[in-house]
Amino acid sequence: MKAIALIDANNFYVSCERVFAPCLRGEPVIVLSNNDGCVVSRSNEAKALGIGMAVPYFKVREIVERHGVRVFSSNYELYGDMSHRMMEILEDSSPEVERYSIDEAFITLEAQDYVSLEKIGREVKEEVYRQVGIPVSVGIATTKTLAKVAGHYAKSWSELDGVFSITEPSVHTPILKRTSIEKVWGIGARSAMKLRLNGVSTAFHLREADESWVRSRMSVTGLRIRQELRGIQCHTFATSPSSRRGIHSTRSFGELVESRDDLRAAVSMFVARACEKLRREEMVAGAITVFVRTNRFKPDERHYSGAVTLRLAPLTNLTPEIQVVAFRALDSLYREGYRYKKAGVMLSDLSPEQSASQPLWEAEKQARMRDLMFNVDRLNQRFGRETVQYGLFATEGKWKMKLSSRSPRYTTKWDELPKVCR
Amino acid sequence: MSIEISVVPETPTVKDGQYAGFPSPADDYLCRSLDLNDRLVPHPVSTFFFEVKGNSATEARIFEGDIIVVDRALDYRDGNLVLAVIDGQFAIRRLRERDRRFWLCSPDQSQEDLPLTEEYELWGRVMWSITRH
């Protein structure tokens, strides 16, 4: 039987820091966003002290100082590299891997029965930990939306030990009955409120709700979610709700790609698509990861896979700016003589557009760019994708980043290697 | 770090005019310049580099300033040189099996042998060390 698993790293950024600093294990640790604005990752010990997600640092400074919480600035070069390693292990475990965000992926599993599915899920979890040192949770179900539900419990119910499969019908229904509607993938706070007013307060209610009622109240988006809750796969890349931990655009090539130009064209398109999504969510990104890989299962061909993560400064969601950085990443990745099977980009370090702090002179330039983007997006919407395309764009000016307390780039810089002293 | 690995299990060598190892369907393998990555990093995803400080592992021929290549993906056996985590710190130790238990032994015998319990972690195997001259 076939199923979908959501592999979701636990407290990913903190976990990355702990791989190279074992003394952090068991300690309260937090990681702050690009501008040292908000908390983007917390260890379980930090959560227990009452430090919430996405709160600005100044609000938790008192707790930090009182309990000696360790604080790190985001180290996106490290996180991007560790993410790529994790994804590569998944690519070896499953024929289909969707790198959904920097620390989550959907993979397909195939097994004889329900029990075997959970066993495979556990093997994947153990393999990721063994090779990369990152703990993950695995949620298994027949659709992505249901896998997300399973993943939520896999992560929060410690007795499940990180793996939970809800493919079995007897487990399925009671779980949906106790899953509040807010927790369903793609249901925002506003939709949830509306649904509750109409008596839909759990995932089960939504699943059982009348089809035409859902279509009229929530349009095709809500209908998709209902179908997925019923076990009917609906989501494609374009319709998947965005993760606040990363926006991706990747593709497996039907015909292997060999030339640098072809790969550049593909990456250019990936960036455009990801930025479209980013702008629609009204977010900006602080880092981009570009990865390429050949087909590992071709025995008579050389295999290569690599990823590069570069910072975006200032934070942006403007396609031409991000394309320049993506090309730089690709240039350092590209190897002559390989036939590439898959490539993609991941935008991470996301924050809402308004809260992104930047110098005034950037704001004006960005405002002009934004108007341009708005019109481009509108034209593309009306006349079809890529009606208007981008040429290359040179950015001017540098923006100094506040890089206080960022850990070393352990895996991407020779002079920042982890040390062993004993 | 971008690393390439060769899928061909062995690089054919020429011995007395005979080829040893698998003949490669892609002839360019035979003429390709040697890449250290092929030899030192067969598992890029689980391989990490560390810098050595201090001289406590000189008995294992590892010196201050060396880079060690550590692989997390391999099984552990008696005699392996490992990167262990002891009291929250990385340490290079020799894994020894005695009386059906495993022990972490310091290369220069300066530290007491530690029985391998859950308190200590085997982070990875030290596969290579790189010394600059």
Image (cartoon, rainbow, N blue to C red):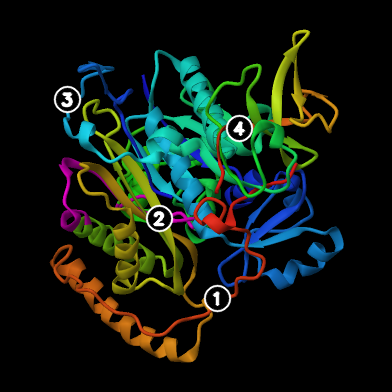
**Closer to the observer: label 3 or label 2?**
3
Q: Which residues are magenta?
A: A238-263
* Label disc, if present, on residue B25 of the rendered structure: 3
Residue A110 lies within the magenta run:
no
Q: Which residue is mark 2?
A: A308
Q: Which residue is mark 4?
A: B124
Residue A254 lies within the magenta run:
yes
- Give the crowd class for mark 2: few <14, some 14-19, many >=20 residues within 10 Å: many
Marks 3 and 2: same chain?
Answer: no
* Label disc, if present, on residue A401 of the rendered structure: 1
Query: Could you tell me how far apart the alpha carbons at marks 3 and 1 are, in whole angstroms?
Result: 50 Å
* Chain of residue at mark 3: B
Q: Amino acid at mark 4?
A: Gly
Residue at 35%, 60% (x, y): give it.
A329
Q: Amino acid at mark 2?
A: Val
* Label disc, if present, on residue A271 of the rendered structure: none
Cβ atoms under marks 3 and 2 closer than 8 Å: no
